[in-house]
């Protein structure tokens, strides 16, 4: 599953677990309703749009008739998601099951679509004369703030210590841990996985942990969620007044500044500016790349143009790497080429991008605009031991691709389809040998799993063996057994229970 879908499922799961009373309060905000709509499955969006202007109840059977037989799984997923969020209200009756859209959600979502009574849900735009805050300045500000967090996690030489609020969040989310002896922060396995996610997934990973922290601080979750969803709906670069914010939301502004989501000239300013990172909160775009390359291309250039050029990596010969790099005039920073001999070329001079590559690549040379390295068994195993999975490595290589590689792969697929129109092959932009080998290196580590515990053997008869092994299995501490050799292995935690049981039943040590 892609990080984009993991992101949506994580946010939706959090919303679904909220009490129904809090969900109802959330639906009073048009901006929040619009954001939740964007996070729903596509089929759920279709159902909502068909019901929002229709006050009459609809039969669930009628919704089912709209879906082809091949889409029944998507139908069930959509209905389940809408019911969990209490967007569908069942109507009691003797006939077929009738449902209707949550009335509070209906009115708020209708206002969001038509510009009705939004009650400052989308912020209060200020009309400032001689405003010196430009989009380029906001881009630089948000990139600096966000990359400060990533640099600190990777531990590059350019790393600056983030604010205490950020440090507390990194520690609370278990992305980093504080060493008791030295007080230094060390990245965890979850932190390594975090670095390979897309930018919008990274932002929501932190915000979901932030939401859990606010629960511990007994902050109003409705105020917190409404402000986060409102940020995703604000227009990039426009000045917004703080007068319409609650006290909780004004406190949140400080934290959002630390993450690079908003900009304020000073902590007491009554105006704030949403950055481009804030617009990613409810974005449907899936190709926002991670790390510094993404920040440079998304935040410093026209994001739609740069995203449309982002492709995936593929196989090429040794002699072609330099030719391809020279042909690309507007090459996205961090574009990768992977060859069938496991050599890797990254067109980047970003210390952050290079540091992240070093997590799973054995780097060899660095030039003014490029680094070279090789995917080796040792480099991949080191990444796997740090908690990064083979699928994440492959997805990272595909996401940070050289645009020419996708075009080469698409050309090869077109030729296959010309020869065989029934060809079922998918687009293979990475060399199959590289993909298979990375997965095999992961399987090497997965073959052997170690457990701490105790081995029981040398039973006088099969009855004694059966009595103790069955007990160990019943209480859930049995890890392995061999009936033929009359041996079994129990976990370290369950050893004392099995010993006590043996002494009672067998009346001997």
Image (tube, rainbow, N blue to C red):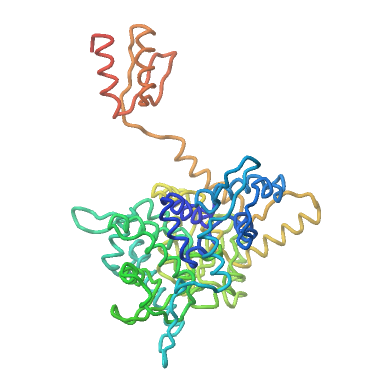
Residue 48 relative to residue 250: left or right: right
Judged from this view, the residue extending furthest toward the bottom is: 130
**With respect to residue 372, does 463 lie above or below?**
above
Residue 183, horizontal then vertical, whole percent = 21, 58
Judged from this view, the residue extending furthest toward the left is: 181
Residue 330, horizontal then vertical, whole percent = 57, 77
Q: Closer to the camera, 56 or 488?
A: 56
Q: Is residue 298 visible?
A: yes
Q: Quadrant of the C terminus?
A: top left
Residue pictured at 32% horizontal, 72% vertical: 250
Q: How many marks overall?
A: 0
Residue pictured at 39% horizontal, 61% vertical: 222
Residue 335, horizontal then vertical, whole percent = 54, 67
Q: Is residue 366 visible?
A: no
Q: Closer to the camera, 121 or 461?
A: 121
Quarter of image, res 320: bottom right
Residue 341 relative to residue 149: left or right: right
Residue 410, horizontal then vertical, whole percent = 69, 61
Q: Closer to the camera, 286 or 365?
A: 286
Q: Closer to the camera, 371 or 164?
A: 164
Residue 495 relative to residue 342: left or right: left
**With respect to residue 100, does 453 lie above or below?**
above
Quarter of image, res 322: bottom right
**With respect to residue 364, does 379 lie above or below?**
above
């Amino acid at each position: 599953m892609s990080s984009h879908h993991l992101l949506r499922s994580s946010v939706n799961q959090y919303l679904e677990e909220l009490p129904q009373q809090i969900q109802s309060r959330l639906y009073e905000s048009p901006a929040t309703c619009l954001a939740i709509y964007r996070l729903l499955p596509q089929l759920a969006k279709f159902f909502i749009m068909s019901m929002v202007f229709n006050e009459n109840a609809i039969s669930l059977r009628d919704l089912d008739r709209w879906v082809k037989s091949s889409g029944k799984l998507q139908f069930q997923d959509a209905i389940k998601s809408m019911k969990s969020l209490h967007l569908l209200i069942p109507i009691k009756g003797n006939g077929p099951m009738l449902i209707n859209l949550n009335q509070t959600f209906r009115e708020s979502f209708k206002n969001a679509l038509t510009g009705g009574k939004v009650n400052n849900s989308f912020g209060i735009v200020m009309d400032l004369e001689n405003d010196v805050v430009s989009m380029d300045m906001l881009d630089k500000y948000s990139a600096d703030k966000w990359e400060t967090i990533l640099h600190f996690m990777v531990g590059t030489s350019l790393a600056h210590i983030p604010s205490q609020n950020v440090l507390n969040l990194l520690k609370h989310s278990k992305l980093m841990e504080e060493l008791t002896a030295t007080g230094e922060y060390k990245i965890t396995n979850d932190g390594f996985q975090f670095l390979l996610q897309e930018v919008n997934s990274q932002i929501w990973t932190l915000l979901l942990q932030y939401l859990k922290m606010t629960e511990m601080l007994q902050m109003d979750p409705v105020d917190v969620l409404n402000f986060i969803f409102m940020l995703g709906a604000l227009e990039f670069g426009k000045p917004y007044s703080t007068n319409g914010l609650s006290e909780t939301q004004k406190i949140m502004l400080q934290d959002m500044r630390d993450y690079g989501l908003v900009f304020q000239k000073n902590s007491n300013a009554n105006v704030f500016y949403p950055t481009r990172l804030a617009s990613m909160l409810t974005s449907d775009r899936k190709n926002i790349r991670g790390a510094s390359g993404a920040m440079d291309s998304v935040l410093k250039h026209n994001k739609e143009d740069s995203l449309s050029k982002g492709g995936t990596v593929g196989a090429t010969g040794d002699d072609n790497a330099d030719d391809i790099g020279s042909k690309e005039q507007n090459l996205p920073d961090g574009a990768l080429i992977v060859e069938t001999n496991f050599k890797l070329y990254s067109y980047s001079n970003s210390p952050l991008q290079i540091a992240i590559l070093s997590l799973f690549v054995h780097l060899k040379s660095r030039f003014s605009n490029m680094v070279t390295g090789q995917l080796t068994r040792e480099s991949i195993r080191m990444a796997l031991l740090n908690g990064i999975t083979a699928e994440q490595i492959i997805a990272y290589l595909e996401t940070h691709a050289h645009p020419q590689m996708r075009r080469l792969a698409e050309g090869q697929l077109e030729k296959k389809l010309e020869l065989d129109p029934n060809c079922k092959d998918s687009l293979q932009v990475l060399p199959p040998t590289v993909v298979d080998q990375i997965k095999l290196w992961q399987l090497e580590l997965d073959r052997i799993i170690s457990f701490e515990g105790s081995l029981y053997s040398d039973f006088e008869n099969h009855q004694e063996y059966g009595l103790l092994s069955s007990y160990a299995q019943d209480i859930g501490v049995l890890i392995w057994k061999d009936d033929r050799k009359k041996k079994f292995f129990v976990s370290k935690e369950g050893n004392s229970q099995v010993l006590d049981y043996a002494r009672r039943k067998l009346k001997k040590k």
